Structure formats: structure tokens, C-alpha cells
């Protein structure tokens, strides 16, 4: 792993900041284990901005919600993972922030940032990459012992890939530098040339066009920065910017990785049955709901394929009436098809939409007729490489806030609220 700082031009390069393997959660007390039901095993995925907090201010229902999720000793009753498309801080920092706001202990092992799944993209771990974003870049770099500083007097060696963590502070500077790298084949000291196409790999984390902070209206997210980059590259070269991977919600690889963390927590809780269902709670129909439903579609397709293979191996034949006719997912939607880990997957993933963030019942309505066209209903706020499927924006449930969401889940699973 190497990081290079080119002081004169403001370059800051470092090896892909891939999250280490998820550490196992602390062993839960026997008091927590009493909540495990053999017939009902589930986990909870919480979005953060717009669900639990607005900027630095906690949403009132969040504190009470989490008091109901822990026992008298502060141990969680069910596996909980916080899945955010933010990537401008360390997991430890985010965990401490959530612990303070929610008044319950949140471990870094429960926090999943937009770039956490990058740990699975091992082919980029030894590359020299240009990283765009904001936050404690130096702190992230120092977590990797192999990262070395290269004095600018030695020149800037070729860049192998570009990793986009999140929207930067100075958009125009980062856009310029990224285009320089792409149009010079990773040698920004040389002249632009359209011959460098296909360009070097680009991996983007966080596709949120909008997100909810403390302001009254939604703020531009990293998805908006990607729109700018794609437009600039197309305008300058006439070619389409290509992504090696799109990571973060709503990609399947993100939910696949989050489910792995849920599974590990369940094991530490002493649950002896697999997690059968995952509930994803979010405020953004185009990120949280779309992603959860896309993952649910992936789960159903995987189960169908597995059943067909088992039938064939047993000497049976494929039932024509049972052919899986769900739309095939694109590589972009999977987030990198080869990165999705096949294992004993949950039976399904349910999406729950809250009205305390990007989505508000007072401001917009869900699609009443999924068969209508985009222009008849609403403009697609998802990423360019994701197909617009209106049915995927339809949540399994709509509730007012996160407290109601957890109460609904417990009722669905037949668990006591206290």
C-alpha cells in the first residue's frame, strides 16, 4: 500500500482505504440470549442521516427506540448494524458519535461506511490510487503500516486507479484532478489524450444524489458530484465514464456485506439458527428502499436458482412454470458481481420507509402505479447505471419514525416490545 502527496498541485494519493475484516462483537450475556426465538430470527439495518439524526441533532424517537433494543445491562436484544453512505470519518468516530446521541453503546463493528465493502476488492489493495473525498485522510492512511510517504522531488509515479469516497469540499479542484488522471492514463504530468480509453479503473462509494442534514431542504450528495464528473468527462472526450464498481447503497454488495455483519452478531448472541429475515430502515426511497428491495430480489433469485440446482442434482427436471422471470441485475447493481458472497442467505429483506428525512408525506407521494413511466411519476434520482424500476421504490412498510419502525418489526416477528 502506498500513499503519495504531491504538495504543489494538491494531489493526495493513498492506497484504497478498505475497512478491515469486521471484528466479532462482544459476547452477549445470557440475559440477551433469552430474546432469541428459534422460529423468529432477524436483524436490523439502520440508515443514520434522516432516520436517527439530522446533522448533529438526534431525531427524538431514536433514543426511545434504542432503549427498547437493549436489555437492562445495555446489551442488544437483536443484531443491529448501522449502514450509512457516509465515508468521511472513521468507524470508531461514527460509533462514538452514535453512542453519545443515542445514549447506548455502539461498537465500531456495528458501523458500516459506504466504502467498507472495498475490503473485498483485493486486487486494488496493492495499487497506487487517487482518493477523492473529505475527512481524516491522514488518519485513515496511518491505519495501514505499509503506506509510505514519497517526497514530491522524486516525481509522481503513475496512478493505477481512482477511488471516490464522497463529495469533496472543493468540487472544482477534485473534478479537475480526476479528469487529469483519467485523460493521461494515470500520469497527470503528461498531456491529455483520448487514446487513454478505456481509462484506468474508477471505484465510487456512495451514490446518494441527495441527503438530509439540519437544513430544511435536502443537500447535494456524492451522487451529484458523480453526475458532474460523468458530464465533464463526456463533454471533454465524447466517451462515457465507466465504473469498475459502484459501492454503497443501493448496490447488492453493500447489503450482502451488511448481512454478513448481522450474521456475525447473531452468532455472538448465541443464536443457533440462521438469520431468516433482515429489516432495512431508511428515509431515502432511491437509496435505502431501492437497495433493500434490490437485495430482496437478489435473495429470491438466489433461492430459486439453488432450488432448481438441487432438483436437477437429485435427478429431477426444471419446472417450466417455476422459471425465475425476475429482471436480471446489472453488474453496477450488484456492485461488482464477483464480490457478492454466496452463503446460507436470509429468506428475505424487508424495507421500511420513515418520514423524518428525505421522504416526507407532506412533500411527496409514493408511486401509486408502478407501471407508469418516469415522466408520468417522478424524475429518477438513482445512479445513471442503475435501471429505474418503480416497483423497487415501493417500501414493504411506511411509518412515521424509527421508533414506529422497530415496534412494527417486533410485532411482525412476534417479539415483546419490552
Image (tube, grey):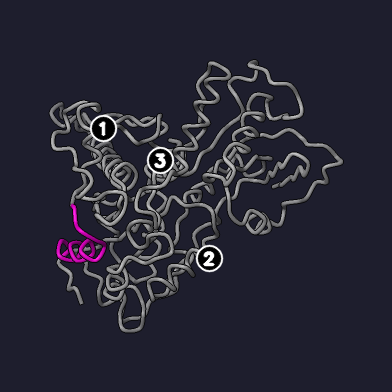
Q: What residue is drawn where x is 68% and y is 43%? A: 13
**Badge 2 local density, few (<14 within 10 Å), some, or many (20+)?**
some
Instruction: Tell me the distance, in whole angstroms, between the alpha carbons under discs 1 and 3.
Output: 17 Å
Q: Is residue 345 above or below residue 274?
A: above
| Earlier residue among tags 3 and 2 | 2
Quadrant in which the C terminus is drawn: bottom left
Q: Which residues are magenta?
A: 398-413
Q: Quadrant of residue 269?
A: bottom left
Q: Point out which mark residue 77 bears.
A: none
Q: Position of residue 40 (x, y in %)?
A: 20, 63
| Earlier residue among tags 1 and 3 | 3
Camera-near label (1 vs 3) is: 3
Magenta highlight: main SS = helix
Q: Nearer the viewer, residue 24 or 69?
A: 69
Q: Is residue 93 above or below residue 151?
A: below
Q: Is residue 371 above or below residue 238?
A: below
Q: Position of residue 64 (x, y in %)?
A: 28, 73
Does the magenta-highlighted stretch encompass residue 174?
A: no
Q: Quadrant of residue 266?
A: bottom left
Q: Nearer the viewer, residue 264 or 216?
A: 216
Residue at label 1?
389
Q: Cβ–Cβ below 8 Å for labels 3 and 2?
A: no
- Return the residue found at the far front: 216
Q: Point out which mark residue 92 bears.
A: 2
| Earlier residue among tags 1 and 2 | 2
Residue at label 3?
209
- Return the residue found at the far bottom: 72
Amino acid at each position: 500500500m502506498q500513499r503519495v502527496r504531491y504538495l504543489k498541485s494538491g494531489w493526495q494519493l493513498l492506497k484504497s482505504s478498505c475497512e478491515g475484516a469486521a471484528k466479532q462483537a462482544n459476547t452477549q450475556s445470557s440475559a440477551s440470549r433469552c430474546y432469541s426465538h428459534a422460529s423468529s430470527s432477524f436483524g436490523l439495518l439502520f440508515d443514520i442521516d434522516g432516520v436517527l439524526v439530522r446533522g448533529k441533532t438526534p431525531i427524538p424517537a431514536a433514543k426511545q427506540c434504542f432503549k427498547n433494543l437493549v436489555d437492562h445491562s445495555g446489551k442488544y436484544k437483536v443484531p443491529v448494524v448501522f449502514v450509512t453512505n457516509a465515508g468521511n470519518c472513521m468507524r470508531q468516530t461514527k460509533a462514538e458519535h452514535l453512542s453519545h446521541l443515542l445514549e447506548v453503546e455502539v461498537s465500531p463493528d456495528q458501523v458500516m461506511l459506504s466504502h467498507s465493502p472495498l475490503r473485498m476488492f483485493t486486487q486494488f489493495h496493492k495499487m497506487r490510487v487517487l482518493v477523492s473525498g473529505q475527512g481524516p485522510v491522514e488518519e485513515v492512511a496511518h491505519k495501514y503500516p505499509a503506506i509510505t510517504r514519497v517526497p514530491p522531488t522524486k516525481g509522481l509515479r503513475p496512478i493505477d486507479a481512482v477511488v471516490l469516497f464522497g463529495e469533496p469540499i472543493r468540487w472544482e479542484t477534485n473534478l479537475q484532478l480526476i479528469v487529469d488522471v483519467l485523460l493521461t492514463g494515470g500520469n497527470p504530468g503528461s498531456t491529455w489524450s483520448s487514446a487513454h480509453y478505456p481509462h484506468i479503473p474508477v471505484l465510487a462509494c456512495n451514490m446518494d444524489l441527495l441527503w438530509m442534514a439540519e437544513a430544511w431542504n435536502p443537500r447535494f450528495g456524492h451522487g451529484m458530484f458523480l453526475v458532474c464528473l460523468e458530464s465533464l468527462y463526456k463533454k471533454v472526450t465524447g466517451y462515457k465514464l465507466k465504473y469498475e464498481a459502484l459501492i454503497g447503497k443501493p448496490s447488492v454488495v453493500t447489503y450482502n456485506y451488511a448481512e454478513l455483519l448481522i450474521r456475525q452478531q447473531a452468532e455472538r448472541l448465541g443464536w443457533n439458527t440462521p438469520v431468516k429475515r433482515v429489516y432495512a430502515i431508511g428515509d431515502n426511497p432511491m437509496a435505502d428502499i431501492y437497495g433493500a428491495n434490490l437485495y430482496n430480489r437478489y435473495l429470491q433469485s438466489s433461492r430459486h436458482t439453488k432450488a432448481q440446482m438441487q432438483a436437477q442434482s437429485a435427478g429431477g427436471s426444471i419446472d417450466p412454470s417455476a422459471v425465475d422471470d425476475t429482471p436480471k441485475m446489472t453488474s453496477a447493481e450488484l456492485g461488482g458481481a464477483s464480490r457478492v458472497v454466496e452463503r446460507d442467505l436470509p429468506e428475505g429483506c424487508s424495507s421500511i420507509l420513515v418520514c423524518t428525512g428525505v421522504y416526507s408525506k407532506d412533500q411527496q407521494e409514493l408511486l401509486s402505479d408502478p407501471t407508469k413511466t418516469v415522466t408520468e411519476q417522478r424524475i429518477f434520482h438513482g445512479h445513471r447505471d442503475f435501471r429505474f424500476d418503480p416497483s423497487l421504490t415501493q417500501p414493504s412498510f411506511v411509518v412515521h419514525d424509527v421508533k414506529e419502525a422497530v415496534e412494527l418489526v417486533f410485532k411482525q416477528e412476534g417479539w415483546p416490545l419490552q
